[in-house]
C-alpha cells in the first residue's frame, strides 16, 4: 500500500474538539513529538476565536514537554490518563482544568479494550520504519500502542529518521486475549519472547505519515546527591544481607527499579557490589545507569517497556546497537507490568515514596494529601506482586521542615499489606512478620530523622488502643503544622488530647 505523506500541521488540522487520541511511547521515548505541537497551536487559534477545543489524551505513561507540556500550556487537554510528570500539566490537574484519572499502568490497555473509556479516534505512533503491509518498527518505548492502534479509527505515523532500523528485534509486541478467553502469559525468565518484533496494523487506517528527525529529548539525570547516595547504599546493604542469609536465591532474582536519582544511585551501588552476582531486570523503565552496568557485565539482560536514556546515551546505544541488541527487550506496559509475570519471576521491586507512615502505609502521589505530583505509575503493579517490595524516600525534605515519615499518610496509595521494607537515608526498616506497633518502632527508630523521632514516639503513645493505635484526632498533626506554620516540627499533639 502507498501511504500519504503529510505535514504535522496537516495532521493536526484533522483533529477535532472532543477527539480521543492514543499515543505511543512510555515516558518520553517513543512518544510523538511533532503533531502534538501543531495540535497545541490549533487549540490556541481556536480559543482566540472563541471556539472550544480540548482533546482526550491516553498514553502509556508520562510523555515530554513536546506533548503534555505544549498541550497543557494551550489548555488543550480535557481528559488525561494514566500518568504524567510535566509541571504545566500538573498545574492544570490541580486546578481542575484537566480531568486526570490516575491508573495502574498495567490496567490502562485492557480497560481501554473493555470499553471503559470510550472509543479512540486517532492513534499517533512514532516509528523507525513502516512496511507497505503495515508492519511497524517501534521506537524506544512501547507503552499501550498495540491496543490504541487496534482500537483507533485512524492512525498517524511520525516516521523518525533518528531511529535506526536496527531496532528491529528489540521489541516483543504481545496483546493478551480479553476475558474469558485469556491464557497464561508465557514468560518464565526476563529474556523469553512471546510476541512479534513489529507492531502489525491495518495499513488502510493510516491517514498520514509525518517525517521527523529527533532524539527523545530526555535530559541527563543529575548526579545523585549525598542523601540519594546514602539511600542507595542502604538499599544495597539490605539486598546484600538478605542474599547472605539465603532470603534471596543464590541465582539472584530480577530487579525492578523506578525512575530518578535514588533509582540510579541504587543501580550504581549494585554495580560496585562484589557480593551480589550478576543480575537481570524485569522492569518498566531502564535508565542510563543500566547501560553502564551492561557494559561492565553486571546486568546481563533487561526486559522493559522503555529505554529512557538521555540523548547522549541514546546516541551511544544506536552507535553500539550490535552489543546491546540481545540484552534488551521492550514490551507493552500490560506485559512489562503484568502482576502474573511479576509474581512468577519473583521480581524484587524498588520504588520511591513521597511519604510513609509509622505503620507502613505509603503515599506515592499527593503532596500533603491534596496536590497531585505525578501519579501511581507502575509502583502498585510491582509492589503488590513482588518477591520483596522496597520503598525509599529521604527522611526529611525542605531542609527538615517536612518529615517524610509521618503518623498517618495524607493520601494512601499502598497499604501496609503491600510494603515489606522502607529505606531512608537514616536506615532500613524490615517490616515483614511485624505487627503494627512493632512496625511503628522499627520505622521510627531506623527511618525517621532524629529531629522527628520524639514527636513520632509521642504520637504512638497517644493511640487509643486497638491493634493499630492511631489517634484519629492527631493523625494529621504533622501536615496541619506545616500548613499553619511551615514546619512539621511544630506539631503540637497536646491540643488534640
Image (tube, rainbow, N blue to C red):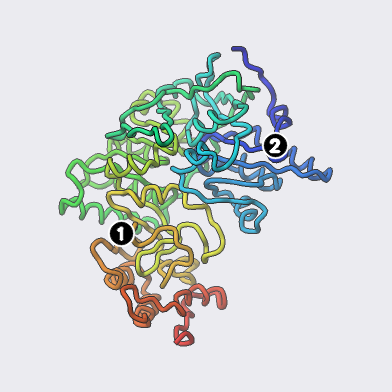
Question: Crowding at label 1, few (<14), some or many (≥20) Cα neighbours within 10 Å?
Answer: many
- Residue 19 appears at what percent x and percent y? 67, 37
Instruction: Determine whether 197 is above or below 343 in the image.
Output: above
Is residue 61 at least partly visible in the picture? yes
Residue that numbered label 2 is attached to: 39
Q: Pointers 2 and 1 in contact (CB under 8 A)?
A: no
Is residue 271 at least partly visible in the picture? no
- Choose between 93 and 392: the one closer to the eye: 93
Instruction: Determine whether 474 is above or below 1 in the image.
Output: below
Answer with left or right where residue 348 lies relative to residue 67. left
Q: Residue at x 73, y 39 (%)?
A: 41
Is disc 1 placed on a helix, strand or loop? strand
- Residue 400 appears at what percent x and percent y? 46, 71
Residue that numbered label 1 is attached to: 421
Image disc number at residue 93: none
Instruction: Determine whether 378 is above or below 31 in the image.
Output: below
Q: Alpha carbon of mark 2 to alpha carbon of mark 1: how far?
A: 45 Å
Q: Residue furthest right?
A: 49
Answer with left or right where residue 283 lies relative to residue 19. left
Q: Residue at x 25, y 52 (%)?
A: 239
Between disc 2 and disc 1, whose residue precedes?
2
Amino acid at each position: 500500500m502507498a501511504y500519504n505523506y503529510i505535514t504535522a500541521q496537516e495532521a493536526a488540522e484533522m483533529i477535532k474538539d472532543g477527539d480521543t487520541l492514543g499515543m505511543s511511547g512510555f515516558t518520553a521515548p517513543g512518544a510523538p513529538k511533532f503533531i502534538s505541537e501543531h495540535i497545541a497551536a490549533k487549540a490556541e487559534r481556536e480559543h482566540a476565536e472563541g471556539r472550544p477545543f480540548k482533546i482526550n489524551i491516553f498514553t502509556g505513561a508520562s510523555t515530554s514537554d513536546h506533548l503534555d507540556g505544549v498541550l497543557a500550556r494551550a489548555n488543550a487537554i480535557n481528559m488525561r490518563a494514566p500518568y504524567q510528570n510535566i509541571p504545566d500539566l500538573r498545574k492544570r490537574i490541580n486546578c481542575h482544568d484537566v480531568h486526570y484519572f490516575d491508573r495502574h499502568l498495567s490496567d490502562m490497555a485492557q480497560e481501554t479494550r473493555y470499553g471503559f473509556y470510550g472509543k479512540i479516534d486517532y492513534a499517533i505512533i512514532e516509528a523507525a520504519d513502516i512496511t507497505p503491509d503495515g508492519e511497524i518498527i517501534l521506537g524506544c518505548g512501547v507503552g499501550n500502542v498495540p491496543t490504541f492502534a487496534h482500537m483507533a479509527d485512524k492512525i498517524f505515523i511520525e516516521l523518525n529518521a533518528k531511529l535506526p532500523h536496527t531496532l528491529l528485534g528489540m521489541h516483543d509486541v504481545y496483546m493478551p486475549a480479553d476475558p474469558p478467553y485469556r491464557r497464561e502469559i508465557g514468560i518464565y525468565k526476563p529474556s523469553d519472547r512471546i510476541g512479534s518484533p513489529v507492531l502489525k496494523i491495518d495499513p488502510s487506517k493510516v491517514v498520514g505519515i509525518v517525517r521527523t528527525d529527533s532524539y527523545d529529548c530526555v535530559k541527563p539525570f543529575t548526579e545523585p546527591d549525598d542523601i540519594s547516595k546514602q539511600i542507595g547504599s542502604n538499599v544495597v546493604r539490605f539486598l546484600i544481607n538478605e542474599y547472605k542469609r539465603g532470603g534471596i536465591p543464590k541465582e539472584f532474582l530480577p530487579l525492578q527499579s523506578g525512575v530518578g536519582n535514588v533509582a540510579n544511585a541504587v543501580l550504581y551501588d549494585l554495580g560496585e557490589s562484589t557480593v551480589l552476582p550478576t543480575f537481570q531486570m524485569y522492569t518498566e523503565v531502564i535508565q542510563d545507569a543500566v547501560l553502564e552496568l551492561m557494559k561492565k557485565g553486571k546486568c546481563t539482560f533487561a526486559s522493559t517497556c522503555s529505554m529512557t536514556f538521555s540523548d547522549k546515551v541514546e546516541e551511544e546505544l544506536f552507535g553500539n546497537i550490535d552489543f546491546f541488541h540481545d540484552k534488551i527487550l521492550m514490551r507493552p506496559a500490560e506485559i512489562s507490568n503484568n502482576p502474573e509475570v511479576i509474581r512468577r519471576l519473583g521480581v524484587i521491586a524498588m520504588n520511591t515514596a513521597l511519604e510513609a507512615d509509622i505503620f507502613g502505609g505509603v503515599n506515592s502521589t499527593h503532596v500533603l494529601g491534596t496536590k497531585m505530583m505525578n501519579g501511581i505509575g507502575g509502583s502498585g503493579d510491582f509492589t503488590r506482586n513482588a518477591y520483596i517490595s522496597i520503598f525509599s524516600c529521604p527522611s526529611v525534605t525542605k531542609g527538615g521542615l517536612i518529615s517524610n515519615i509521618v503518623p498517618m499518610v495524607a493520601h494512601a496509595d499502598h497499604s501496609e499489606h503491600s510494603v515489606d521494607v522502607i529505606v531512608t537515608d537514616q536506615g532500613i526498616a524490615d517490616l515483614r512478620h511485624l505487627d503494627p506497633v512493632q512496625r511503628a518502632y522499627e520505622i521510627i527508630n531506623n527511618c525517621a530523622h532524629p529531629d522527628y523521632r520524639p514527636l513520632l514516639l509521642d504520637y504512638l503513645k497517644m493511640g487509643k488502643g486497638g491493634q493499630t493505635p492511631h489517634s484519629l484526632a492527631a493523625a494529621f498533626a504533622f501536615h496541619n503544622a506545616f500548613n499553619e506554620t511551615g514546619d512539621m516540627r511544630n506539631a503540637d499533639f497536646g491540643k488534640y488530647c
